[in-house]
Amino acid sequence: MKKVDDYKEMKRRDFFKKTGKGAVAATMIPMAGSAMDKQSLGDELGDRTSDQWKQVATGEMGTPIRKSNIDVDVAVIGGGLAGMCAAISSARGGAKTILVQDRPVLGGNSSSEIRVLVLGAMSMKKERVDRETGIIEEILLHNKFFNPQESWSVRDHVLYDFITAEPNLDVVLNTQAIEAKMDGEKIKTARCWQSTTETEIMINASLFIDCSGDGLLAATSGALYRTGREGKEEFGEKYAPDEPDGWQMGATILLASKDHGKPMPFEAPHFTIPFDVENAHPKRKLKHFQEGFWWAEVGSEKDIIGEFEENRKKLMGYAYGIWDYMKNSGECPETENYALDWVCSLPGRRESRRFIGDYILKEPDLLNYKHFDDAVAFGGWSLDEHNPGGIENITEPPSYFHQKFEKIYEIPFRSLYSRNVPNLFFAGRNISQTHIALSSSRVMGTCALMGQAVGTAAAMCVNKKVLPRTVTEKYMNELQEQLLRDDAHIPNRPANDEKDLAKKASAIFGNSTVSGDANLLIDGVSRDEIDKIHHWESDGLPAKLQLEWDKPISISKIEIKCDTNVNRNIMMRKDQQDNDKFSRYVPIELLKSMNAEVRVKGKWVQVGEIDKNKKRLIKFNFEQMKASAIRLNLKETYGHKNVKLFEVRCYKS
């Protein structure tokens, strides 16, 4: 184990050696004499010129200087699921990447600190879930394998394990990007403060991706943004208010309770605010008290960021007020044996700044399922606009749930970068959209798809030495093809990668078939649709699938998309549901073990094998060779009697 740890530490140091140019670790503190020129520190965070530090070991007085400069290609600000997916996709694309997170844990609203469910494009008017694939699915599956007990605190470390294993990517926690240093119109440096080490970290990058939600870095860069609700007229939004106003959806404090099998008395703390049950709207239901109430929320019509701490104090009072009513009013006897098991201390935010891109996503785009030539992500959660004021507007329902979607809608790339700061991307709730559009797209599964899209685009920008807008103008097809290859789904956009050698195969066949057709594996759609299938399924296991070419081809990569049942949700829940819609466990349909062979001069040569697969997208990379066929030997799933595949690709390099 120590060898593994030493290797990881060596790799971490190597990353900083290559990208940091003199990064200073917190434990390596240079000492400056007390006569240091105070003026030289005037614009620095943590001015320590008055620091009276006596080093007992040496008897010397000095001033600790904790500064770090890091050079990377791409800096991702915000370690929620959008930021994680952005950082991973950027690093996988070959860009030296750093992820900056202002908390000690990753996951944003889905972390153990807040515990919001990873909702996504669950179209509620039909049975199909339309679950997200790509990096967000990898993350959810990783949790299924390494956290089967569904512990929220363990999940934090599952996320940390997943992202820190990614080469070419470094993660900096407890660090907030507080200021953008500019070079003309572009951001040159993100000025950051790491609270745990009292260190000022200057991150220099070619491209910046702000996935922080509130978007402080983007705001200090001069990027255009807006807050509040647009009126009906501006974008033709029927669910918008008649006139624009300043209201923003509020943050929520969640709680959870536990059955102790005996009466559990409760005495409310002094800061409790009584629950106004007489005026509460009937949709403020109390029945799901084990998992808590998402509507203990306070909105704002002015400065929701500046008011955050005052609202947090209120929210603590409101949350305990609801529980006090349930325990002590006599109206909820079902809570007699229950006691609070966890109460959130960091409210989960829904809305603040929305930055302006080349396109503003709006309500009619979603409701009319508008097709965008630059679509890179999708959504499907309902128009879930919480009422102005939240629990302080208690006579209104907690959310209006204006309209549900019949199918998924598209999100354009032009909404994911700044109109006026040319090297700045966004992903998450702070993208270029209206308040009403945000009411749907803000859920974390959808935000994660945006993150993968901008991370992939950022790596492309680095490789081509271009800026985000140029991707829209010249390289959109290439970006979409890469996203599809990486197992993202783009509605109404089949893959058609000219480099994919599988499309040139003269024959594709399996040794047995119970449904679908092996030729569907190259049709460009890697999931079944409502009225059309795109898979091949074996009749039992083990099974074989073979691709033949008329003439030998040069090949070094085989990529396979198998089945994880995207019609069943695999997010971690608080109530541990396991049914036709939600799964607590690794999908039984997932391919567990297989190997791949290529036929060279009439002989089969094994080029890859996997015994405990944990992903929908399986990749085999090997030395390039001339082959006339490939054969996939499919051995075992995690419990299903057949194996189902959705795509096979082959590449020369």
Image (spheres, rainbow, N blue to C red):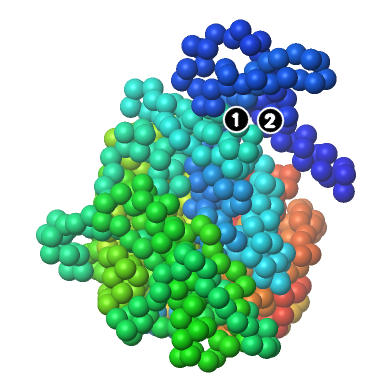
Q: Quadrant of the C terminus?
A: top right
What residue is drawn where x is 69% and y is 48%?
165
Q: Residues within 10 Å of mark 2 (few under 14, many from 20)?
A: some
The one of 382 and 555 positioned closer to us in this rendering: 382
The circle drawn on residue 255 is none
The one of 54 and 615 positioned closer to us in this rendering: 54
Q: Amino acid at mark 1?
A: Thr
The mark nearer the N terminus, 2 or 1, is 2
Q: Position of residue 18 (x, y in %)?
A: 66, 26
**Relative to 73, is 411 on the left or the right?**
left
What residue is drawn where x is 55% and y is 75%?
267
What residue is drawn where x is 48% and y is 90%?
330
538 up-or-down from 81: above or below: below
Describe the element under mark 2 as helix, strand or loop.
loop
Q: Position of residue 646 (x, y in %)?
A: 56, 69
Q: Position of residue 17 (x, y in %)?
A: 68, 26
The one of 367 and 26 positioned closer to us in this rendering: 26
| Residue hosting label 2 | 26
Q: Amino acid at mark 2?
A: Ala
**Relative to 108, is 354 on the left or the right?**
left
The one of 619 and 171 positioned closer to us in this rendering: 171
The circle drawn on residue 199 is 1
467 up-or-down from 593: above or below: above
Describe the element under mark 1 as helix, strand or loop.
strand
Q: Is residue 544 visible?
A: no
What residue is drawn where x is 26% and y is 56%?
301
Q: Quadrant of residue 51?
A: top right
Q: How far is mark 2 from mark 1, CA to CA?
A: 7 Å
**Relative to 168, is 488 on the left or the right?**
left
